[in-house]
Amino acid sequence: MPSVFIKTYGCQMNERDSEAVAAQLVAKGYSLARSESAADVVLLNTCSVRDFAEQKAINKMRNVVGTARSEKRSQIVGFMGCMAQSRGRELIDKLPDVDLVLGTQKFHRAAEYLDELLAGKREKIVDVEAEAKSEATIREHLLNGSAKTSVSAFVSIMQGCNQHCTFCIVPSTRGEERSRTIPDIVAECRELVSRGVREITLLGQIVTSFGKRDHPLLDGKSAFVQLLDAVHEIDGLERVRFTSPHPKGYGDDLVEAYARLPKLCESAHIPLQSGSDRLLKLMHRGYTRERFLGVIEKLRKARPGIGITTDIIVGFPGETEADFEMTLSLCREVQFDNAYIFKYSPRRDTPAADMPDQVPQEIREERNHRLLELVNEIAARKYDTFIGQQVQILVEGPSKKNAARYTGRTRCNRIVLFDGSTRHQGQLMDVKIERTGSFTLYGDPAVVNL
Ligand code: 5AD
């Protein structure tokens, strides 16, 4: 049977899509290869959020086809996901060795198309059409990959985004918002829990808009909060998370959910993008600095100690030094646990790409550097506050870098390394934090058992 290697770029949604495609192929008898050179099929699951991510995947594809050609191997190669969706056939014009271009509504067709290509029935396949109900097709999981049992799983609850932020390509790569039904999602979560999963992260491009069209408010609760309630009910599930929300989705119902639902972990990734009202408006974000600060304050009141991370763009068109300083001051005020900083990258067919006053590259670099320094300094200080504390972790398995060390996550989503063994796998346990590394905590489980 053919073997397949899938390389994933970008976000957790992409990781999840790759997992679903891999599981689908394994169910059809394919095996998973350890490297691209050993595989009969190589798929690159792509990201389009910035030009850099697209270039990485294109360069990788050039290497893959170059190596296959020089070694005279016949390999089926394909692009899937966001860049496949936005560029379509153009990718084959650019790289004629590419056999398959599979859009974001077609992941469930991967096995069928690969079978046809491998059998020589078709020479090239490009499928980037829209498909009704495709949001409900990302459901297969690979829970027992590479000799380890997963205790944590991602569940895709919706696809697409209608927010149309002026910088963002996602509405054209992922399409309009389409949500799965609550019973369908709960059934998938139950199945995962029955197979040993203890932590579930609900995924979507804008999860706080989940089910808006189809589910009316119920007792003042949005469809998303109704979904959280339903998933929370599942016996045996210990932790619930979600990503990514939109700041404007934090109504009182969601804030109250943090106070009400103990399984809902005290961590939130809330994309800020800018601290300047003028820029937030140009970005079409739909909230102000004050509203954002209000959300953070309410969440911290509902769940003291909640870990809050964010995304910020520097160098958006028209960003002045004064706008940028508003972002710096907001970061000082909020004290994010971590922030992912992105240099603005113009994306095709987005309004911001044609806005006046594009910020010169060197200023984007300089602001990136300054913000990173501030964010890292705050993050390091926050990490240090954990030293000496006892925290609960869910143990995921051996660390990738050092198999003698085990890795787990705290409820507020920080990685903890400790000297563990297979008996710790999948356990919820308390550890005492002894020291910190960069974006890691080191814990000692023995201290608790004394
Ligand atoms: N340029 C730079 N960063 C971007 N992001 C989205 N679009 C762009 C763009 N055109 C960032 C946002 C988003 C994160 C996933 O990527 O911060 O939250």
Image (cartoon, rainbow, N blue to C red):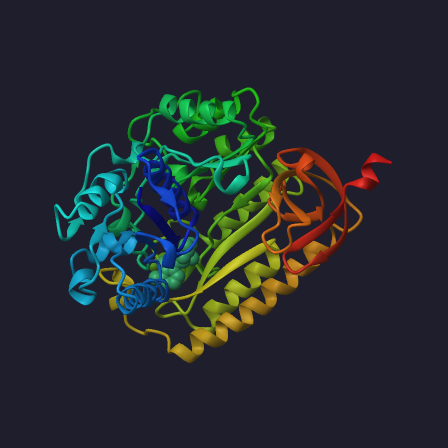
Q: Residue 48 vs residue 265: left or right?
A: left
Residue 61 placement: quadrant:
bottom left
Looking at the picture, how far across and down is residue 47, in whole percent? 34, 56
Looking at the picture, how far across and down is residue 360, in whole percent? 37, 78
Residue 249 placement: quadrant:
top left
Q: In the displayed orientation, state which residue is furthest to the right.
A: 450
Looking at the picture, how far across and down is residue 383, in whole percent? 69, 54
Q: Is residue 321 visible?
A: yes
Q: Residue at x 41, y 29 (%)?
A: 222
Residue 379 placement: quadrant:
bottom right
Q: Is residue 392 above or below residue 96?
A: above
User: Which quadrant of the picture is home to ligand 1?
Assistant: bottom left
Q: Residue at x 45, y 29 (%)?
A: 225
Looking at the picture, how far across and down is residue 235, in whole percent? 55, 19
Q: Is residue 294 above or below residue 96?
A: above
Front residue of 435/356: it is: 435
Q: Is residue 280 visible?
A: no
